[in-house]
Structures are given as C-alpha cells and as structure tokens.
Image (cartoon, rainbow, N blue to C red):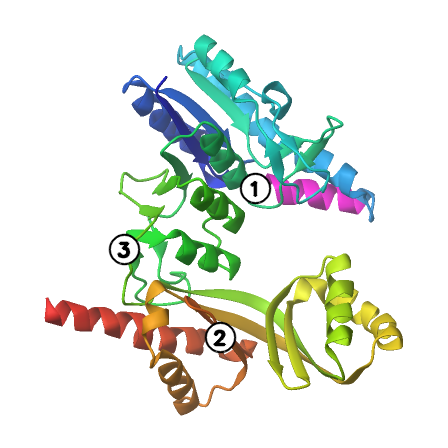
Amino acid sequence: MNIIVQKFGGTSMANKESIKLVVKKITQELTKNKKVITIVSAPSGITNYLQKLIEEMSPNPSNKELDLILSLGENISISVLSSILKNNDIKSSFVNPRDIDLITDNNFNNAKIKRIDINKIYDLLRLYDVLIIPGFQGISEKFEVITLGRGGSDITAIAIAAALSLEYVDIYTDVDYVYSCDPKLVKNPIKNKSLSYEEMIELSSSGAKVLHNRCVEIAHKYDLKINLKNTFSNKTGTIIHDNIEKSFISGISLLEDNFIINFEITNLKDLSDFFKILSENKININIVSQSLKNISISINNKYYEKTISLLNTIKSNINILNINIYKNLSKISIVGDGIKDNYGIISKIINTLNQNKININMISCSEINISLLIDKKNICKAINLLHYELIESDLKKQEEII
C-alpha cells in the first residue's frame, strides 16, 4: 500500500480559501495512486481562544479539563475538511485517536505517544482513500482525551509516519523554507534548502517556531525525512534529514523573555538538590553555566513567578548563597554543523558585540550551538549584526570562491 502522511497547520485550516488549497494538495497525491493520511491542526487562533475561554470562566482549570477543551479545535478542522472532501467525491473519513489506539502516557498538557495500532490504520485505508486525523491529541490508557503540548500536531504526523515505516512526511505550513533567521527580524534571511536533524532540533528548541523539536527527534530516531513545504506555494521547501556536514552557520533563533539566577554553592549535593526541586516543579532550564562554586542558570519568564515562590523553600533546605536575579534578557542561539570546526567563531561573536557595546550576560556552547543571553533592548541590533557577520558575509565569500 502506497501511503503518504501530510500535516497541515492552523493557517492552512483558517478559512475556506486556504482549505481549498489543502484539498488540492491531497488530490495531487491521490492522482499518484497514493493513500493519504492527513493530520490537521486547529484553525489559526482557535486553541488560544479556547484556552482564554476556560480560564476566564474558571481561573484554575485542572490539566485534564484544559486538555478536554483544547482538543476541540482540531475536531473543527477534521469535521470541515471531511465534509469538503466528501463534497468533492473523495472517499474519506475523519478518524479520532481512539479509532487507531493512539495511546499516550498520563502527562496531561504535554503527553508522549506510547503506541499506535497500525493494523487499524491499514484496515481503514482499505475502506477509504483519505484519513483525516486530528493532531495535537491522543488518549490515555484510561481513554481520556490528552494533548501533546503546543505544536503537537507535528508530533502526531511524524509518529504515525514512523509507526508505518514511511520514508518521509510532508509538513505544510505558511513559510516557504526554514530561513537562517526570522524574516521579521533581519533584512536578508537566507533560505535553507536542507538541514540536518541536529540543526533543526537546536533551532526548534531555541525559539524557531517552524517545527516542534520533539517531532524532529522522532524523525531522527526512525530516519524519517521531513519535507517542510508551504501550503500557499509550490516551492520545494526545506528538507530535514541526515545532511552532509556544512562549514557555515545554518540559523540564528531567538527565545525572548528570560531571567538569570546567579548563586554560589558549597557542594555538589546542594546543586543536585536544587535542580531536583526545579525538575519536580516542571521548571525548565535553558542554559547552565558553572565556574568553581559560582552557578548561573537561565530560565524562561513563563516560570518566573513559580521559581521566585520556590526560592524561599529552596533557601531554607539547601545551602545556596548570594542569590542575584537579572531580568529582561533574551536568548540568541547560533546554530550550525559548521560550529564544531570553526575555532574562531566565538571570538568573532564576542568581538562583533563588544565593538557595538552590547554586553553578553551569559554564554554557553555545544558542538552545533552557541547561545547568548543579552539585554532585551539590544536584541534587534545584535541579531542583525550576528546574522551579517556569521551568515551573510560567509555566504558571500563562498559565492566569490565559486
């Protein structure tokens, strides 16, 4: 059975005109004698509306209640698309997670998929040419509706394609490519026609909103190629796969609104206990830096109130000293396979920002990622300077060589 999995995001399901384009993409695959599994997100803005609705009526909904209402947006999409396909005489059916045993763990609001019954998918595909499946959601072992976290429709699509052992999956969004930086932030973003899994994971984890990092991790594990395309154009898009090593930076991403906690420790057990408390309260740390007994950690602002309230408890149980908090910071991440072999890149970054009197509050490095925390007010200037020095100028040098 020749099967293709397509995923369409919220902008693709936003209105009648965009849904017509979705139908066109589906029909194009049907003409190639393929069976189509279409994963859809909620129409653009609907999930935010549903979350605001329940929080206005009930300020502290349980995670279980929140998941139940947030899952409704995708049900709108599958109902509308199914109706339109049938009106076009296409043998199709919408399929709920329960119908294919898309089972998750019990972590409401951020569940992970445990298994999918592919035999049930094959049985349905023998009856229909197109299956329409809601993204972002599954069911727990107790058959309760549960969501995979924001952006989870990507995860649904990749997980189903991986379960079926497909070679690739098409992810449709509203951008032509994964650009070297958000076009809203820089003047001359560069198109990435291909990226490695590692590069895409780093970009997604550090602020790029094109793909969910968990979906790329699954694709990497199962050697599943991701074709990122634009619903509204016929451009080739960006391919995510095992890429030939490159010698330049592939992208710069931004994660706004972070704060730093600086403190001192007397022993490693205290540090371990400190991180354990943060973990138990589901507070994610995005950068850790250590110099002897001095520790700096960066945390996104969405955890600020919870973190501050925990600090008094932490101080009374763990021996941490000289706590200082710095707010209004943004994290810039420079990503690329070329970083590991480019020994002068950190020097270039520091010199570029120093010459323009932009202070770096914190820096961390890995083989393919250099992350900086700087004052939020300098973000636009810093990103444009770094994008030019690390990406645009490097590309110009390569073109001159060619």
**Mark 3 belongs to which amino acid?**
Ile
Q: Residues within 10 Å of mark 3 (few under 14, many from 20)?
A: few
Q: Nearer the viewer, mark 3 or mark 2?
A: 3
**Mark 2 belongs to which amino acid?**
Ile
Q: Residues within 10 Å of mark 2 (few under 14, many from 20)?
A: many
Q: Which residue is mark 2?
A: 379
- Image location (x, y in percent) of residue 150: 60, 46
- Image location (x, y in percent) of residue 279: 73, 60
Q: Residue at x 67, y 37 (%)?
A: 70
Of callouts 2 and 1, the N-terminal one: 1
Q: Which mark is residue 152?
A: 1
Q: Is residue 113 left or right of residue 230?
A: right
Q: Residue at x 68, y 85 (%)?
A: 293
Q: Residues within 10 Å of mark 1 (few under 14, many from 20)?
A: many
Q: State which region is magenta.
A: 45-56
Instruction: Name which quarter of the figure residue 168 lies in.
Output: top left
* Quarter of the rendering occupied by the C terminus: bottom left
Q: Main secondary structure of the magenta part?
A: helix
The relative height of residue 238 versus residue 125 in the rendered view (above or below) is below
Can you see residue 81? no
- Image location (x, y in percent) of residue 114: 62, 34
Measured Cα–Cα span from mark 3 to mark 2: 31 Å
Nearer to me, 220 or 228: 220
Q: Is residue 352 left or right of residue 99?
A: left
Measured Cα–Cα span from mark 2 to mark 1: 28 Å
* Quarter of the rendering occupied by the N terminus: top left
Measured Cα–Cα span from mark 1 to mark 3: 28 Å
Q: Nearer the viewer, mark 1 or mark 3?
A: 3
Q: Which mark is residue 244?
A: 3
